[in-house]
Amino acid sequence: MKSDKLPRHIAIIMDGNGRWAKRRLMPRNYGHKRGVDTIDRISRAVFDRGVEILTLFAFSTENLNRPKEEVSGIFELFGKYIVKNLPDMLARGIRFKVIGDVSICDEELRKLIADAEKKTEALAEHRLNICFNYGGRADIVRAANKLSAEGVTATEETFASALGTGGLPDPDVVIRTGGEHRISNFLLYQMAYSEIYFTGTLWPDFGEKELDGIIADFMKTHRRFGRIEQ
Ligand code: IPE
Ligand code: IPE
Ligand code: MG
């Protein structure tokens, strides 16, 4: 049976900012800046279509190995993004959460994150998760240690709830822009049954038309979860 249902949770590996800038002979951070504009456009479109949860991979633990100016530029853009978008999140009922190890952020950024999470905590219409300094394996290891410290037996349910996405359904759709066919340590546990879409479009160029095509395709997909067709 076709699902005919909108995805409830879309996750995106936003890749290709650096190449987008390079093609224009611009510094990589200019690509990241334009990537933030795409976040504004695409998050609005995703929520307008009625999708409940959007999870974005913004910065991986491995991305810390990039040149210092690039890393600090991304951290700065992240802070600006929160300041600019908080009013909109409050107005549109979007609960904001950062998933990943934010202890490496400076105090100002940590405060911005904590403040936005707190102010949007009670909102229930939509969920926007930003994976920042996030690694799928680290998330799994942290969850295992958490359960063990609490003396809780690991089951698929207790384990899922100990992950950064705890309490949320797994992503129905995972999109990777930028043309690479890999997961790069994103939601390793959570994407067991996600429909995965790889597109060559670089993230700053990713638009609503392509998003709508992916959603339409998902709605035609037969999700069997290991069973046979009924
Ligand atoms: C994705 O774009 C954003 C981050 C990983 C922070 P990239 O910066 O990886 O862009 P490319 O892959 O080099 O083009
Ligand atoms: C994946 O992109 C991480 C994010 C989009 C945040 P990368 O550019 O870091 O991935 P690799 O290095 O090509 O695997
Ligand atoms: Mg990349």
Image (cartoon, rainbow, N blue to C red):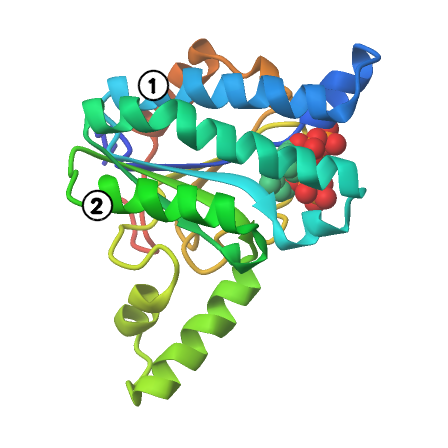
Residue 54 can be seen in this image: yes
- The location of residue 197, given as percent across then percent down, is 51, 32
- Check mark 1 vs ligand 1: CB closer than 8 Å? yes or no: no
Placement of 30 over or under 116, stated as above or below: above
- The location of residue 15, given as percent across then percent down, is 63, 31
Residue under the image location 53 percent in, 23 percent down: 36
Residue 186 can be seen in this image: no
Mark 1 residue type:
Arg
User: Which mark's residue is nearer the viewer, 2 or 1?
Assistant: 2
Residue 90 or residue 197, whichever sits in front: 90
- Where, by quadrant of the figure, is residue 157 drawn? bottom left
- The location of residue 122, given as percent across then percent down, is 15, 44
Q: Secondary structure at mark 2?
A: loop
Residue 130 or residue 52, whichever sits in front: 130
Mark 2, other Cα within 10 Å: few <14 / some 14–19 / many ≥20: some
Mark 2 residue type:
Glu
- Where, by quadrant of the figure, is residue 96 drawn? top left
- The location of residue 191, given as percent across then percent down, is 43, 51
Q: Which residue is mark 2?
A: 121
Q: Which residue is mark 1?
A: 44
Residue under the image location 49 percent in, 55 percent down: 100
Mark 2 or mark 1: whose residue is earlier in sequence: 1
Q: Secondary structure at mark 1?
A: helix
Ligand 2 quarter of the rendering = top right
Placement of 148 over or under 175, stated as above or below: below
Q: Where the C terminus falls, by quadrant?
A: top left
Residue under the image location 29 percent in, 54 percent down: 227
